[in-house]
Structures are given as structure tokens and as C-alpha cells.
Amino acid sequence: MKGKVLLREELKSNEINQMFEVMKNHYENINYEKFIRDLSKKRWVILLEENGRVAGFSTAALIEIEREGKKIKGVFSGDTIIDQQYKWEMEFQKRWVKFVTGLM
């Protein structure tokens, strides 16, 4: 399994469609329009691929607030799903930690 972090705008249409299929395989009543609307609010996607197919993903957005004169950053993780057969792979955890620490 290989993982990569992409800006949402870098996703190809076939990757987006495969992401939606992964969601449909794990959740009921998934709506494509709502999926696209939620995806459009995120800045990054951590994409997991196996043999050229999406096996899992997570979406993320950066939240920045100021509190008592200090800037505080946070990462909001949206949809996150990994196919059952890959759930014990460590690629997602490695990519997530590297991604988040790179933002700070």
C-alpha cells in the first residue's frame, strides 16, 4: 500500500469516484452530492492506494484561531475510511503523523 498527501484540487476525477465507492462500501445512505460538498470544504486528502486503486483516505482542513494573543493551529479530519482488508497497515498512520507535524 502506498500513501500520499494531495491538495484537494490535485485529485483526479477517477480518484474522487473511487473515494466515493470506498465510502459506499462501508456506509449506508451515502449521497454523492453531499460527499462532494464535504470534500470541497477540505484542503488536503491523504490517499491510500493499492495496485492503482483507492483503498482508503482521509480529508483534512487547517483551523487557525487566535486566543489571548497566541495563534493556535488545529487539524480537522473529515471523512476517514480504510478498506477492512488494509485496516492493520501502518501507511495511514505514518502519512498522518508526517502530514500533521509538517503543518506545525
Image (cartoon, rainbow, N blue to C red):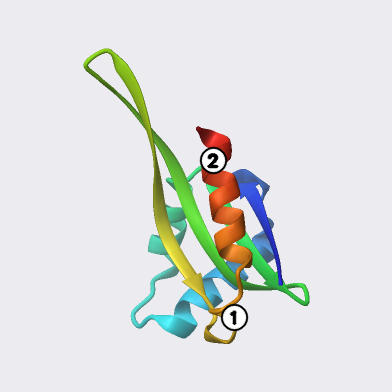
Disc 2 residue type?
Thr
Residue located 69% across and 57% down the image = 12
Residue situated in front as seen by the camera: 104 or 11: 104
Asked which quadrant contains residue 95, the reply is bottom right
Q: Quadrant of the N terminus?
A: bottom right
Q: Mark 1: which secondary structure?
A: helix
Tell us which disc is closer to us: 2 or 1: 2
Residue 86: which numbered mark, if any?
A: 1
Residue located 67% across and 47% down the image = 10
Question: Which residue is disc 2 drawn over?
Answer: 101
Residue 5: image location, x then y, percent: 64, 51
Rendered view: 31 above or below 73: below
Disc 1 residue type?
Tyr
Mark positioned earlier in the residue sequence (2 or 1) = 1
Residue 101: image location, x then y, percent: 54, 40
Q: Residues within 10 Å of mark 2 (few under 14, many from 20)?
A: few
Looking at the image, the residue that sits furthest to the top is 69
Residue situated in front as seen by the camera: 42 or 14: 42
Residue located 48% across and 84% down the image = 25
Rendered view: 7 above or below 96: above
